[in-house]
Image (spheres, rainbow, N blue to C red):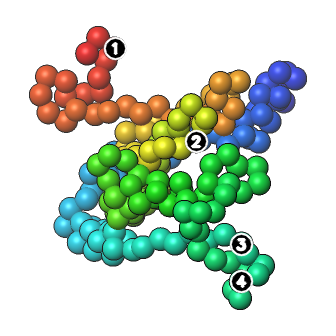
Amino acid sequence: LVSTDASVKRLLQAMRSMAPGGWTDNRWEQSASYDGITYACVNRTGEQMAQSEFQLFIKDPDSPEGKRPVTKDDPPQPGFEIPPYKLVELLERPNGDDSFGDLMYSWNQQLDLTGMALTWMVPNALSVPMELYPIPTSTAIPQPAVNPDYPDGYWRIQPVYPYGPFSSYPAPVS
């Protein structure tokens, strides 16, 4: 065994973190197979998911079921700075273009095609998520670098331009 204390520490730090690992499959190829019978199945389950509704509850020992629906008048929960109804508003309108159903369709599509679904939660100045965007898994490249800025690693989003003069991964000069 040829190793140093520093390399063992680095390995343990990486294994104990939530950092993403490298792909074992070609996510681009998996996403490109969205046709034929795959399209029929994934689209149908996506349509069903898009019609789903969500409900948000608060634990309440006084209610018969031990929980009750969140209301606009609920104060922030202990340890949180914002009222729980803000989560309802975020899920109703995740971003300027999508509804909850659109988000569910995208999540279902990515889960069925690649086995995972990534979401970008855009925070405000208080680090509270204000917008949610589904990220196509085929454009995300796991970066398991564990450092103080990214203690759990990160994902590099690499857009792909399939046609035209930039028909490859964009370069820094493009």
CA separation, marks 1 and 3? 50 Å
**Nearest to N terminus: mark 4 or mark 1:** 4
Q: In the image, what residue occupies the spot 19% across and 36% down?
A: 162
| Tag 4 residue | 63
| Quadrant in the rendering for residue 109 | bottom left
Residue 1 appearing in the image: yes
> 137 above or below 66?
above
- Image quarter of residue 166: top left
Picture layout, residue 8 above or below residue 138? above
Point out the frontmost of discs 4 and 3: 4
Q: CA distance from mark 3 to mark 2?
A: 22 Å
In the depicted view, which residue is nearer to us: 3 or 149?
A: 149
* Residue at disc 1, secondary structure: loop
The residue to which callout 1 is attached is: 172
Give how far across and how far down residue 165 sits, in percent. 13, 22
As drawn, the label of residue 59 is 3
The answer to whether 2 appears left or right of 27 in the picture is right
Residue 110 or 128: which is nearer the viewer? 128
